Amino acid sequence: MPSVLANQTLFSSLLILTAATIVIVGLYLFFEFNKVVRARQLGALQDLMRGKVLTRSPEKPRTSQVESLALGLSNVITLGFQKLNIYKSMSDSMRERLKRAGVLNRNAMAYALTGKVLGALMLPLLANIILSPYGFYESYYHIVWIICAALGFFIPEVYLYNKKTNRLKEINKFWGDALDIIVISVSSGQTFENATRSAAIEMSNIAPELAKELTITVTELSLLERREDAYRRLADRVNNPLVRGFVFDVIQSELLGTPLGKALQANAYENRKQKEQEVEKKAAALGPKLTVPLIVFFFPILFVTIITPVFLQ
């Protein structure tokens, strides 16, 4: 009997170790794949900003076998979702989140829905592998499955939210620098397109998301019939008050015929003033935030240090 229990314990331990190894290796491959894709996109972006025409090698297939398999599975799942009445609202909401997160792949919608379905299926299976040796799991397995399926379904939402938040932080941090480059370039006599392209080239290494948005705007300025549509699309993708103010000033300057350089200088000055106000606001809020740490950590030690010599005498 003890040998049977020992064998069961060993088997359970090996099962948990195998599942944990699969999860760790999967996460590692996922992040490494993201790094490779990001580096490839950054290289293509820099070539595009410098005017190089992007061509695809005829010897290489358009998509690899893994990408073809993933796309086929995604299309099947998307067709299944289209049978639901909530598909339109779900797809519109997902497209908006993908756009705000900076994901412009034409198949991103299908991949996101596939991630939802696979997360809802695989997470309960993983929980079953890990928790099956424990006694409480037999009584509450249905609750665990429901919770894990819900968590797996919303994992892509969490990923997109995190990507959108990091992207907005990057754009907020470096938007003032890009705007200064545009102002200097326009003031020196360059066109707005060349000034924006110069800002994108300068920002490509330190702020690739911002460089991508500026490059898309320059491209759309030459493709769309109305220039203001390209500006509004930039403000809609970024969804930042600073960028919206910049877009408003540029559109008004082009519609009314006022000097663009002066409008951009005024916008850059307002941007710097707003950053100064944000820094002052954070500095003013530092005192109240330090009150609790001082009371909890500093004052007791100070009190003990002062009163200890009285008892030692």
Image (cartoon, rainbow, N blue to C red):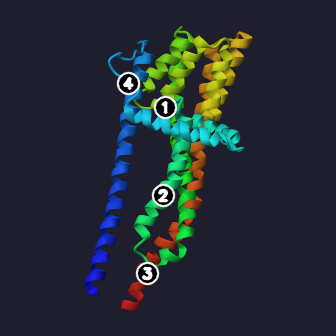
Question: Please, is residue 111 above or below residue 312 in the view?
Answer: above
Mark 2 is surrounded, within 10 Å at the Cα level, by few (under 14), some (14 to 19) or many (20 or more) other residues, namely: many
Question: Please, is residue 51 above or below residue 15 in the view?
Answer: above
Residue 215 rendering spot, x and y as whole percentages: 51, 21
User: Which badge, 2 or 4, is on the more N-terminal residue?
Assistant: 4
**Residue at 50%, 52% in the rendered image:** 119
Question: Which residue is tagged 1?
Answer: 209
Mark 1 is surrounded, within 10 Å at the Cα level, by few (under 14), some (14 to 19) or many (20 or more) other residues, namely: many
Residue 160 rendering spot, x and y as whole percentages: 54, 43
User: What's the distance in space between the residues labelled 3 and 2, CA to CA?
Assistant: 52 Å
Extreme right residue here? 256
Q: Is label 4 in a helix, a strand or a loop? A: helix
Question: Please, is residue 272 above or below residue 247 in the view?
Answer: below
User: Which badge, 4 or 1, is on the more N-terminal residue?
Assistant: 4
Residue 172 visible? The answer is: no
**Residue at 57%, 49% in the rendered image:** 282
The residue under label 1 is which amino acid type? Glu
Question: Which residue is tagged 3?
Answer: 304
Mark closer to the observer (4, 1) = 4
Residue 147 rendering spot, x and y as whole percentages: 56, 63
Mark 3 is surrounded, within 10 Å at the Cα level, by few (under 14), some (14 to 19) or many (20 or more) other residues, namely: few
The residue under label 4 is which amino acid type? Gly
Q: Nearer the viewer, residue 227 or 82?
A: 82
Question: Which residue is tagged 4?
Answer: 43
Residue 38, located in which quarter of the rendered image?
Answer: top left
